[in-house]
């Protein structure tokens, strides 16, 4: 089947919940992917940062195959020999004490919400069913009913009510609003350190530090959703580390934790917080399975051993500076941290999508987010000459 036939078939049999670029990929390696006709593209989306280690990283694929030859799934009814070592590594990397493994990002966010509520009732002693969680306008935390209940995006909610109560919205980056929104029933503040889906939006310096102070003062858990920003993407292991004294009570991790091959997510926190769970309170059949756990441990090792955090920081700074030098009548703003960069297109120049289509024709895959922003987030294994290649393509399309 050719590209046209495959897309036709996909559109016939798939629910219409995505609008992909018209390209059919058949192979990937490192930062590169190939379509069914053998044309080569650079992957500058990295599956929304789930491919920080690149496509089919040899060490991760080796672990996948080795572990597939031993045992893949035990359920949590029995122990397996892979989950403990993975969670230990994850706690070391995140400087936390305890973890709860899940599969997808949304499940980990749900887990964080359940943890915060349980902690609120059992430890903070909030009255039954009164717990409140504060979230930010224009957040993205996933797609379950409870999570879209905290979304402020009309389309994410339209047709999916009734919604889960117990959420309160504040503007992202506004610590004064956060302070006002906190009540004795507030159990948590859930925030992305940089809002990715909203268009790579960065709060002003000091916001997270201020949020940390407010949470500490009011006995509220600070939960950061680092599913997209974590594991090196922004030039730190976790994006909250860009600020001083902003260590959260809980970090939600996903995407790149699975090394681009297998869905693995987790919540990491302290014993005081994750200690609220008792057997039977919460769970997942596949969560913590030995195949995913083995993959995740290697995925973490690759990030640390290959210094991907440092590479993201250095090349991200370089890329941002080079992009800013491009003389373009179309660019409103270029912003980002590490290899997490948003190029905002002026409204008068139309939407970002046609620019992404032009980039695709140039052999560079990037996906617009929220109409006006081209998101650049290549795998963190990228090298300097390949960054220069991105700059040349961006130059061609933006000038
Ligand atoms: C992708 C993402 C999620 C949801 O993860 P899924 O694996 O798609 O469920 C949640 N939060 C953030 C910040 C994300 O980028």
Image: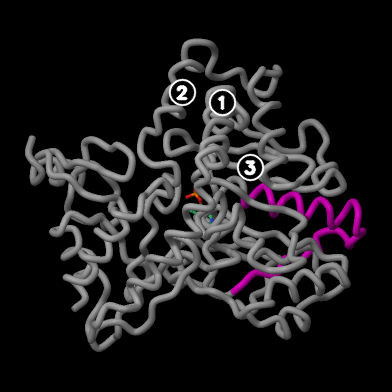
Q: What percent of the width, then of the height, locates residue 151?
A: 54, 67
User: Which dot, 1 or 3, sits closer to the camera?
Assistant: 1
Please say if the residues under marks 1 and 3 sit with CB atoms less than 8 Å apart.
no
Is residue 110 located in the magenta-colored stretch of the structure? yes
Q: State the mark number for residue 64.
A: 2
Q: Secondary structure at mark 1?
A: helix
Please say if the residues under marks 2 and 1 sit with CB atoms less than 8 Å apart.
yes
* Magenta-tinted stretch: 109-136
What is the residue that sits farthest to the top in this orientation? 70
Q: In the shown orientation, is residue 231 left or right of residue 328?
A: right
Badge 1 or badge 3: first in the primary sequence: 3
Q: State the mark number for residue 266.
A: 3
Residue with the mark numbered 1: 294
Q: Residue at x 60, y 61 (%)?
A: 239
**Count of number-bearing discs:** 3
Is residue 230 located in the magenta-colored stretch of the structure? no
The answer to which quarter of the image holds residue 2 is top left
Q: What percent of the width, then of the height, locates residue 184?
A: 87, 72
Q: How is this picture coloured?
A: one colour
């Amino acid at each position: 089947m050719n590209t046209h036939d495959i897309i036709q078939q996909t559109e016939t049999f798939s629910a219409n919940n995505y609008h992909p670029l018209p390209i059919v990929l058949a192979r990937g390696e490192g930062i590169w992917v190939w379509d069914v006709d053998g044309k080569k593209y650079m992957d500058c989306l990295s599956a929304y940062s789930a491919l920080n280690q690149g496509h089919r990283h040899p060490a991760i694929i080796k672990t996948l195959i080795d572990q597939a030859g031993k045992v893949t799934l035990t359920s949590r009814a029995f122990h397996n020999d892979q989950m403990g070592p993975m969670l230990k590594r994850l706690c070391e990397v995140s400087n936390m004490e305890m973890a709860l493994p899940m599969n997808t990002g949304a499940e980990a966010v749900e887990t964080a919400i359940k943890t915060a509520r349980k902690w609120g009732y059992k430890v903070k002693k909030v009255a039954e069913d009164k717990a409140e969680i504060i979230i930010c306008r224009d957040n993205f935390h996933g797609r379950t009913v409870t999570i879209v209940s905290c979304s402020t995006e009309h389309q994410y909610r339209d047709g999916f009510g009734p919604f889960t109560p117990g959420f309160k919205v504040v503007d992202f980056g506004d610590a004064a609003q956060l302070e006002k929104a906190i009540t004795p029933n507030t159990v948590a503040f859930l925030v992305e350190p940089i809002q990715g889906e909203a268009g790579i939006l960065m709060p002003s310096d000091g916001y997270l530090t201020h949020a940390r102070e407010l949470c500490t003062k009011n006995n509220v858990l600070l939960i950061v959703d680092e599913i997209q920003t974590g594991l090196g993407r922004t030039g730190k292991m976790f994006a909250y580390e860009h600020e001083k004294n902003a260590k959260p009570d809980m970090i939600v991790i996903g995407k790149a934790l699975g090394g681009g091959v297998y869905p693995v997510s987790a919540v990491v926190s302290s014993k005081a917080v994750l200690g609220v769970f008792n057997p039977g309170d919460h769970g997942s059949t596949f969560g913590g399975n030995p195949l995913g756990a083995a993959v995740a441990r290697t995925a973490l090792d690759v990030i640390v051993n290959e210094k991907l955090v440092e590479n993201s920081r250095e090349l991200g700074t370089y890329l941002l500076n080079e992009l800013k030098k491009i003389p373009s009548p179309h660019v409103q703003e270029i912003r980002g941290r590490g290899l997490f960069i948003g190029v905002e297109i002026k409204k008068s120049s139309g939407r970002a999508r046609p620019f992404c289509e032009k980039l695709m024709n140039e052999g560079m895959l990037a996906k617009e987010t929220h109409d006006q922003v081209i998101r650049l987030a290549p795998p963190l294994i990228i090298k300097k000459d390949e960054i220069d290649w991105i700059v040349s393509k961006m130059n061609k399309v933006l000038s």
